[in-house]
Image (cartoon, rainbow, N blue to C red):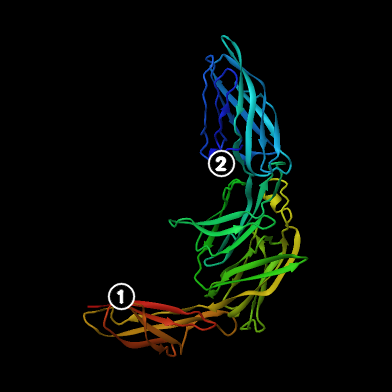
Amino acid sequence: MRVPLSMALGATLMMTGLATSSMAVTPDGPASPGPSAGQSQTKTRQVEDVSVTAKISLPPGSQVQGSIVGTLSITHNGTSAAMKSGSMTMVDPDDRFLQGAQFVASGTTNAWTSTVPLSADAKSGIYAASVNAVVAVTTSDGVVDVPIRTTDPVMVPFRAQRNIPMIWISPSSAPAGSTISVSGAANIKSLGTGEYMPATEQEVKLYFDPTGDAPEALRATLTTDSRGFFTSRHKPGGSGKWRAEMPMTDAGARAVWTINSSERERTTTLRQGSVSATQNGYTAGDHLMTHDVVVGLAPVQRRVDVGSLGFTIGGKSGWVSAESRRGEGSFPDGYRVQREITHGGVGTSAVTFTFNPTLPAGIYDIGIRDAMKACSAPDWAANDAASGASNCTHDVLVEDSTVTTIVVKRASTTTVTASSTSLPDPGTITLSGGVRKVQLVSGGGAQEKPAPNTPVELYFDPAGTAAAVYKKTVTTGSNGTYSTSVSTSTSGRWIAKYPGTSLQASSRASVAVTVG
């Protein structure tokens, strides 16, 4: 009869012969379900002053490979002890009887081992362990044979070793607000052969621990597919550490992997888009992330991050292009540039474009051509990431001239001053200022010049938590300046804002005024 799981770590011995004996089964790691390691049940019988305590120790369930080695150790009140005969036996989760080899010396005094071979298709789960041995104990009065036998099998869980040896963030760095991929592959080690295979239909919990004081939070609960792959899309909301975990189960050991991602600050509108393609039954894709450009007289560099979608890898050749939708100045037919993709790791690529004020302003189409690799089930020849990616060999050409867009605008500058910044009582003040814009000039090049006939919106933002309130719009004169009177009854800030256009960036300035 098998003992219940609540006794998974303990067993009693049948007493025979002229001895007192007891036994405890103690795995070297947690054995859930069941009590903690070291718990035992004993029965004592005193005969002829010979006392023996026996313990069988078993390896952690996740370290089993091809066989299970049990170590029988004893303490006794004799002068020495020797193994006469005996072995360990088991019944596996399929109710198959497993006969262990005869106990042999372990190299440690009063300890012997018995090896129980496992079949190639041995399953993870609960094994029923039993011991039947005879130990000869030498005393001052002679040799006493002590039978050591379990009355009931001991239920011990043996779990498969599971790993997440391959995980990546795609891309590992992106502009604030971007959507990134967290992908990984998991494997599982056979109890019977020790070989690795994809860990299919396994639960994976994905956590994110943001940099700073905010706590780690569960972001997704995933299930590996038939290849052992998992992938999930997220907006991190900042830099931090990702943790992928397969929690311990009755059949499998716990597995954990961590990896960092970073988020870069941005001040303009985020732009992102995805593209994918399918060839010969395999699908691959990219996700592009960047943000708008405001260019003054100095050139501005803008990075476009490229992250692989799902379990695919960017190829060794490809480019990202930027093409204006309008012509202007020295580029009446528009402007197009492409840059070769720089690969910075698995699933992480980027290009950098340089924009200057003489290029056409407006919308640019951002396209890509990427010779990618799609992945079939990994060949876990070894427990490492390289073997996990060994079958990422299926060619898929991903190409699209407009995956996303960016808007390029030339910069502007707005100023505002007040005729008085401190009033004893409510009254009237004069707000003055001007607008200047970066503009193309005849003959080529660009300059920052005063902007005549340009609208300027005026807002008042009262001190405290109340929102700013629109007051009126004025227009700059021929020299690009404005001046207007406003009534001021409370303390706060006056804000002058040039709203911008599709080709010119907005700008603003403010001045604080105190009343009373």
- Front-lying residue, 302 or 107: 107
Residue placed at 63% from the left, 34% from the top? Answer: 129
* Residue 28 visible to an observer of this rendering: yes
Drawn side of residue 19 relative to residue 498, left or right: right
Q: Quadrant of residue 462?
A: bottom left
**Quadrant the N terminus occupies:** top right
Callout 1–callout 2 Cβ contact below 8 Å: no
Residue placed at 49% from the left, 82% from the top? Answer: 500
**Quadrant the C terminus occupies:** bottom left
* Residue 106 visible to an observer of this rendering: no
- Front-lying residue, 157 or 471: 157
Gap in Å between the C-alphas at discs 1 and 2?
69 Å
Residue at which label 1 appears? 463
Residue placed at 41% from the left, 83% from the top? Answer: 434
Mark 2 packing: few (<14 Cα in 10 Å), some, or many (20+)? some
- Front-lying residue, 48 or 102: 48
- Image coordinates of residue 292 in percent, x first then y, are 55, 74
Mark 1 packing: few (<14 Cα in 10 Å), some, or many (20+)? some
Residue at which label 2 appears? 5
Residue reaching furthest to the right? 280
The label nearer to you, 1 versus 2, is 2
- Image coordinates of residue 484 in percent, x first then y, are 34, 88
Please state which amino acid type lies under the numbered disc 2: Leu
- Which numbered disc, 1 or 2, marks the residue that appears first in the sequence? 2
Is 227 located above or below residue 405 in the figure? above
Please state which amino acid type lies under the numbered disc 1: Ala
Is 35 located above or below residue 347 in the figure? above
Drawn side of residue 190 relative to residue 421, left or right: right
- Image coordinates of residue 79 in percent, x first then y, are 57, 13
- Image coordinates of residue 272 in percent, x first then y, are 59, 71
Determine the secondary structure under disc 1. Answer: loop
